[in-house]
């Protein structure tokens, strides 16, 4: 039989959950990579998806790639702590994996959208939520155009999605505007480091 100490790691401490959301093109991936480099002990939740791997993506590192049938079975079995269908593909986060990591006393980082954040917070109300914003919608459009990967229709869809997501920014505990990458990195690291120490940074907006 497991003791409370075993359930929550050797020190009895339960891990902290950090959740980051941002519109596509805001620099979330770069910021999260900087965060993981600064805190190599920070676990990272790899999502499951039914979409095909893109060039360079690695199974188990970028995503767990599974079939639609397998994903739907996971929905029936309540395997996902959050899930969504995006542009015809399913994406989800394993409830078992999350609970196992947090119960062991390790901190965990999630990158998910606004809909997923609400599902996560409902189940894990102690989650530290962080939203990354672009300097402006014009700046966001310029970043997406520079990628050169979207059709005009896809671009407009991404911009509409970004507007909807940014309308929910006040639902997050902390908000960072990525107008200067180094400053945004420092703000994100400051928030996470303080929360890891059990502190609560007073400033909620890093604009």
Image (cartoon, helix red, strand yellow):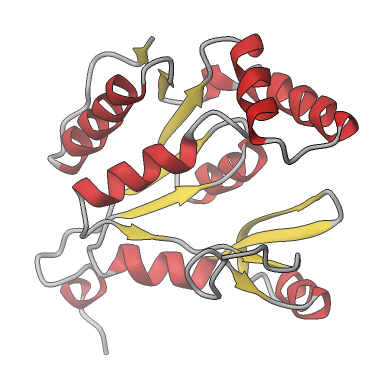
Quadrant hosting residue 154? top right
Which residue appears at 60% of the width and 25% of the height?
143
Q: Nearer the viewer, residue 145 or 29?
A: 145
Quadrant hosting residue 88? bottom right
145 lies left or right of 119: right
178, above or below 57, in the image: above
Number of numbered discs: 0
Q: Nearer the viewer, residue 166 or 25?
A: 25
38 lies left or right of 166: left
Q: Quadrant of the C terminus?
A: top left
In the rendered image, residue 175, in percent from the top left (x then y), is placed at 43, 20
Q: Is residue 82 visible?
A: yes
Which residue appears at 43% of the width and 34% of the height?
129
77, above or below 116, in the image: below
Q: Nearer the viewer, residue 181 or 66?
A: 181
In the rendered image, residue 165, in percent from the top left (x then y), is placed at 66, 26
């Amino acid at each position: 039989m497991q003791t409370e100490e075993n359930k929550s790691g050797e020190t009895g401490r339960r891990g902290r959950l950090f959740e980051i959301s941002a519109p596509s093109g805001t620099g979330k991936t770069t910021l999260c990579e900087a965060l993981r480099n600064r805190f190599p002990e920070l676990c990272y939740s790899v999502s499951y998806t039914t979409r095909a791997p893109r060039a360079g993506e690695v199974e188990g590192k970028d995503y767990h790639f599974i079939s639609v049938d397998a994903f739907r079975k996971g929905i029936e079995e309540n395997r996902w702590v959050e899930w969504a269908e995006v542009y015809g593909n399913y994406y989800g986060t394993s409830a078992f994996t999350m609970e196992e990591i947090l119960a062991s006393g390790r901190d965990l980082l999630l990158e998910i959208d606004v809909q997923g954040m609400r599902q996560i917070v409902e189940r894990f109300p102690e989650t530290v939520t962080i939203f990354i914003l672009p300097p402006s919608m014009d700046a966001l459009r310029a970043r997406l155009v520079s990628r050169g990967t979207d059709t005009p229709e896809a671009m407009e869809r991404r911009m509409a999605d970004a507007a909807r997501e940014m309308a929910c920014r006040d639902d997050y505990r902390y908000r960072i505007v990525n107008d200067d990458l180094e400053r945004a990195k420092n703000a994100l690291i400051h928030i996470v480091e303080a929360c890891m120490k059990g502190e609560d940074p007073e400033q909620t907006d890093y604009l």
